[in-house]
Amino acid sequence: MVSVFILGGGRQKWIASLQDILKRNFAAAWMGEQYFFSESEHPELLILEAERLSHITAPQSIVLCKEPFSAPQSADLPPDAVGLLSSSNLAAAEFLHSCGVRTITLGMSSKDTLTFSSITPESAVLCLQRAICDLAGNTLEPVEIPLTLSRQCEPFSILCAAAILMLSERIDSLKQILF
């Protein structure tokens, strides 16, 4: 099971879109400060959404930072965790760096590790611009992956879902996923 911690303030539109993408394609358990839901006894993904956490011990976890992001005074994250963030989220970048966590930037900039080389209402081409290691330590080389979009999705939620799948050894399922 992969643990995903979504940290930061506010409820952004892309979170609902990410939730929908992951619920449609995987057995996921979602927890927030005031909710919990799971449609499976054995979830593949455990997702916790909170404004702040200062201590995470789950091995091989993914930390997705949303904006606005306010770093805790002190934090302890697993050394094998991976941080996902928008390249414009400088507070999260500083926080993850100070915790010694490797990061993957998501967005539409040529500087981002995961981006789109093209996107239309019906399709997108996902672009991994630099080699990354998944949670198991396998190297994923730069690649472009065509996606079919079955409905309107927030672009950032697609990037987040794709990054979670790549990191959890499911890069091959990206072409079949329901976006």
Image (cartoon, helix red, strand yellow):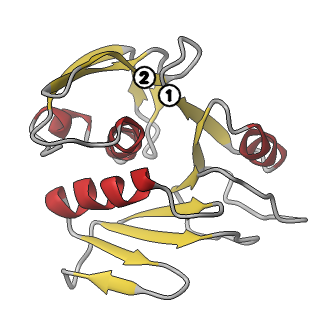
Q: What's the mark number on residue 115?
A: 2
> Could you tell me residue 116's position as x and y percent?
36, 20
For the point 73% across and 72% down, the residue is: 55
- Is the residue 26 above or below the residue 175 in the image? below
- The amino acid at mark 2 is Thr
Density class for disc 1 (Cα within 10 Å; few <14, some 14-19, many ≥20) is some
Residue found farthest to the right: 73
CB atoms of marks 1 and 2 within 8 Å: yes
Q: What secondary structure is marked by label 2? A: strand
- Is the residue 32 above or below the residue 8 in the image? below
Q: Using the image as rendered, state which of residue 59 and residue 76 is in the foreground.
A: 76
- The amino acid at mark 1 is Gly
Q: Using the image as rendered, state which of residue 129 and residue 36 is in the foreground.
A: 36
Residue holding disc 1 = 107
Cα separation, mark 1 vs mark 2, equals 5 Å
Instruction: Residue 42: name its quadrant.
Output: bottom left
